[in-house]
Image (tube, grey):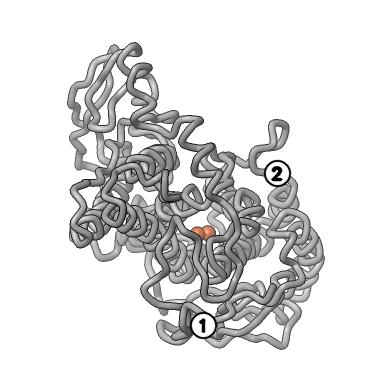
């Protein structure tokens, strides 16, 4: 069951050929998807050979096959982790009952909404990143961008399979809509805010793959616990792909920082703009922007939706099954900083209503580790600069903290202070223009742009000098 059938039009490990109706429906959607990719993906690179990995099995090790592929010919498919025998619903009101192999009727709408919201982020990110190939700092980075892109495309397939297989006509309509919305389009935007933000430079791309893909990781971790078994199995496999996206972001930012440090030492100055580097302060501002925007993706701090989804057994906590805790969460409470009549205070919130915050806690602590990684780089380079993670209250658009102003340490401030300081915290037009000015392609084999250090090693055991994309 774990081996993938590549003989079929749509590679899969779900025995698609035994369900002719579903197979037909998906095979009808497939050309629309490829058309969308050709138009809204990295469209100027449709004809190039790219050294990509493709899933060959969903087993823990060795699932990837590497080889040159033209992106529109990538074998997007449907890969679920194998079904666990007698899996039970691991949390909520139905704790301990058999996991659902079909959509539970009473939760159909909630489940559809959860799946569509997740699904929409996948093509959105491909659209956001579609022009970055033109300014890639190396062939290695270009290849990584395209790897992320094709896998986001595959994540769309993962979700569309669930919609078409389990939600009948509604699911087919949703699948079409997923190809019709457009990132950043005023009339027909993607569902979530961050996924309408333009990504026109590589510093933003590395921040996005660090912070927004990491939001993806935690959403997938919570859905990987779902009592709706096909969703859990789908998300478990998606998580293995997601890890690479965060690697691209985290090491990408690390290389930008490393290069800035080198220039600072070489020229004995903090102003690396004179030498084509990106100042560490600017990197920090981009981190502040993308991290705060991605914090929004977890939703409101106190949420009846989160409570409903948890109670219903649809969306759990990260690693719910492994937690040594009361999996019904009926009784516990969560002590939370809240904003009441414009003032910060602490309050006990019923645990189920705090599930978004519980998940955000995990996200924040993962992000802290990433910041430590950046600080190890500056330290190793002997540069006196400490990166910090902006507080979760900083610069929010969603949730209760969007109703007041907070500085990056989480301290409440008034509008005047915000206006006077925002240019030190978030990228200014000038910062963006400068970063943009550095975005000239470096597409030569073995070369790398001057604002970023080469990676410590290549992909699939290949050297950095390898021809990862044939232009
Ligand atoms: Fe994804
Ligand atoms: Fe991703």
Which mark identifies residue 158? none
Q: Is residue 387 above or below residue 232?
A: above
Quadrant hosting residue 339? top left
Quadrant hosting residue 56? bottom right
Q: Nearer the viewer, mark 2 or mark 1?
A: 1
Is 69 placed left or right of 87 in the picture? Answer: right
Which mark identifies residue 64? 1
The residue that appears at 36% across and 53% down in the rendered structure is 316
**Callout 2: CB less than 8 Å from ligand 1:** no
The residue that appears at 66% across and 53% down in the rendered structure is 131
Front residue of 58/103: it is 58
Mark 2 crowdedness (10 Å alpha carbons): few <14, some 14-19, many ≥20: some
**Residue 395: x percent and y percent?**
38, 29
Label 2 sits on residue: 181
Badge 2 marks a residue whose secondary structure is loop
Is residue 232 something that shows in the picture?
yes
Q: Is residue 21 above or below residue 162?
A: below
Is residue 106 something that shows in the picture?
no
**Residue 207: x percent and y percent?**
43, 50
Badge 1 marks a residue whose secondary structure is strand
**Callout 1: CB less than 8 Å from ligand 2:** no
């Amino acid at each position: 069951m774990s081996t993938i059938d590549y003989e079929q039009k749509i590679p899969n490990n779900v025995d698609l050929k035994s369900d002719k109706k579903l197979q037909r429906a998906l095979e009808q959607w497939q050309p629309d998807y490829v058309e969308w990719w050709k138009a809204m993906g990295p469209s100027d690179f449709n004809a190039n050979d790219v050294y990509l990995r493709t899933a060959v099995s969903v087993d823990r090790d060795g699932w990837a096959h590497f080889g040159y592929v033209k992106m529109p010919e990538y074998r997007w498919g449907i890969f679920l982790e194998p079904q666990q025998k007698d899996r039970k619903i691991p949390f909520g009101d139905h704790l301990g009952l058999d996991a659902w192999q079909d959509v539970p009727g009473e939760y159909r709408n909630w489940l559809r909404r959860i799946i569509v919201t997740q699904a929409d982020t996948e093509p959105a990110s491909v659209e956001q990143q579609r022009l970055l190939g033109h300014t890639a700092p190396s062939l290695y980075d270009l290849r990584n961008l395209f790897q992320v892109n094709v896998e986001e495309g595959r994540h769309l397939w993962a979700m569309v399979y669930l919609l078409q297989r389990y939600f009948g006509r509604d699911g087919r309509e949703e699948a079409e809509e997923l190809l019709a919305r457009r990132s950043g389009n005023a009339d027909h935007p993607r569902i979530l805010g961050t996924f309408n933000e333009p990504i026109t430079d590589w510093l933003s791309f590395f921040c996005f793959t660090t912070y927004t893909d990491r939001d993806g990781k935690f959403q997938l971790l919570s859905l990987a616990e779902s009592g709706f078994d096909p969703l859990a199995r789908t998300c478990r496999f998606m998580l293995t792909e997601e890890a690479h996206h965060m690697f691209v972001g985290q090491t990408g930012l690390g290389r930008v920082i490393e290069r800035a440090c080198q220039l600072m030492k070489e020229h004995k100055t903090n102003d690396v703009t004179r030498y084509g580097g990106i100042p560490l302060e600017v990197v920090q501002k981009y981190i502040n922007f993308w991290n705060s925007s991605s914090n929004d993706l977890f939703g409101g701090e106190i949420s009846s939706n989160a409570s409903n989804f948890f109670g219903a057994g649809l969306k759990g906590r990260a690693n719910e099954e492994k937690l040594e805790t009361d999996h019904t969460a009926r009784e516990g409470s969560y002590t939370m900083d809240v904003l009441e009549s414009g003032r910060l205070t602490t309050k006990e919130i019923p645990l189920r209503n705090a599930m978004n915050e519980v998940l955000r806690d995990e996200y924040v602590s993962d992000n802290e580790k990433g910041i430590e990684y950046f600080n190890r780089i500056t330290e190793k380079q002997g540069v006196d600069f400490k990166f910090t993670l902006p507080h979760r209250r900083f610069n929010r658009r969603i949730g209760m903290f969007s109703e007041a102003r907070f500085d990056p340490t989480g301290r409440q401030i008034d509008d005047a202070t915000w206006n006077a300081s925002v240019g030190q915290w978030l990228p200014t037009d000038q910062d963006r223009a400068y970063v943009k000015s550095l975005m000239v392609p470096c597409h030569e084999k073995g070369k790398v742009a001057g604002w970023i250090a080469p990676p410590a090693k290549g992909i699939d055991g290949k050297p950095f000098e390898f021809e990862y994309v044939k232009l």
